[in-house]
Amino acid sequence: GKFDEAEDSLNKAIELTEDTNVSIPYENLVKCYETSCQYDKALQAQIDLINKFGNNVTDSNIAAKLAVSANDFDLALSYYEDARNMLIKYLKDHPGSQWAIYRLVKYYIDVIECYKLSDRNDREAEQMLLTKFRRFLTKHGLRLHPKDKTKLGLPLIKKGRIPTEAREALTEEALWEFFADIYTDVGMFLMYTLNDFKTALVYFTRQDVYRNYDRASATMSELNLKGDTKRHIALCYAFMGDTALATKYAKQALDWYLANKVEEEYLANPKPRAHRITTLAQCYYLIGDNRYNEILDSLKTCPMCEYCPHSSCYEDYLIRGRLAELDKDYSNAVKYYQIAYDMAPNDCEAKLGTKRCAKFV
């Protein structure tokens, strides 16, 4: 229907702009194929874009992720490596670049997850990548571990190896946000991909210190970021079996989320923003409030996100899988994780959750 019409229109636009440097029709064609789950076509359109307009870090990462969705893992690794090489060169030319450091952190996470999604079971290669990742984090003052006794806060940041001139150009608050953003991604990777909950907890706890907001004056974005941090800590404790601390931090997360009145509006009148609904549902689950079922059920009548090709919400199934696993209801966990993975074949949590829980069925 509409996707076919969009494809025809975009291909005509590409013909009309063939002799120009206008890349927008190509980019939109990639998105059109991706949102209609035609991953092979999306990948080829992305390759055509790269061949015509040249490669860059962003386009390489897009191609890599599409290749993963299309089950072409060798091609995905090749594009990830292209992105890495460009980032290494940029970082050499711009020492201390926050953008390059952050993107290289994402590179290691993406490549390790690519190996796990590919079912290669190449533990030696995965271990080598993990070792390189840890060395990279150490080099830039970003590595933490459960026995880390370093004082929390800015003193740790100053021990990082961002060159003095680059550090001095940043405000203290910008440095804190930079580290907090990286700790979010590393913590989630440790929790959902490696199931290393103790180390993930260290990252989330440090992140909690860096997101030092005043709730009374915090912006909507800051309220949600702080709530997310508390929720991540709560989930770590839940997976570790510490119900008391999971409940404590889930309540703190709700305090931050619900200080943002928009969250209450989502519950009363759900809008197409599934992530905000599922974060609240997880918190209610962790404090033992059965309203979490009603909140998740609201996704069935919630307007779908723009361009979403599915008749139901991927986020709904992923979170139901996660909560079923916490309940040790492995049969339902497998069912929900599998549906989520079928809808998003580049989602590592859904794939690994299916395999992990299937062992208990």
Image (tube, rainbow, N blue to C red):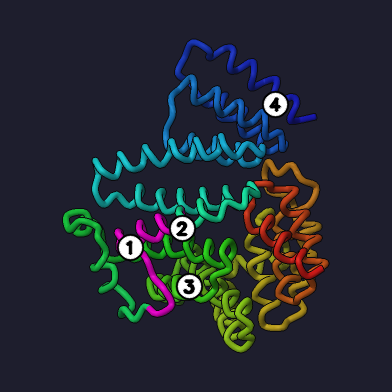
Residue density around tag 4, few if under 14, some if 14–19, many if 20 or more, within 10 Å: some
What is the x, y in percent for residue 90?
A: 30, 40
Side (left or right) of 127 relative to 193:
left
* Residue placed most toward the observer, 4 or 327: 327
Does the CB distance between marks 1 and 3 fall below 8 Å?
no
Residue of label 3: 199
Q: Position of residue 249 (x, y in %)?
A: 56, 81
Label 2 to label 3: alpha-carbon separation: 14 Å
In this rendering, is residue 93 above or below 189?
above
Q: Position of residue 4 (x, y in %)?
A: 75, 26
| Disc 2 target residue | 130
Read off the magenta span: 129-147
Residue under the image location 74 percent in, 68 percent down: 295
Q: In which quadrant of the rendered view does residue 46 lie? A: top right
Q: Nearer the viewer, mark 3 or mark 4?
A: 3
User: What residue is pinned by disc 4?
Assistant: 6
Does residue 320 appear in the picture of this structure?
no
At horizontal 52% and vertical 52% (from top left) the residue drawn is 112
Regarding mark 1 in the picture, which secondary structure is present there? helix
- Quadrant containing the C terminus is bottom right
* CB-based contact (under 8 Å), mark 1 and mark 2: no
Label 4: element kind: helix
Circle nearer the N terminus (1, 2):
2
Q: Element type at marker 3?
A: helix
Q: Amino acid at mark 1?
A: Thr
Residue 116 locus on image (x, y percent):
60, 52
Q: Earlier in the sequence, mark 2 or mark 4?
A: 4
Amino acid marked by disc 3: Thr
Q: Amino acid at mark 2?
A: Leu
Q: Earlier in the sequence, mark 4 or mark 1?
A: 4
Indicate which disc residue 138 carries: 1
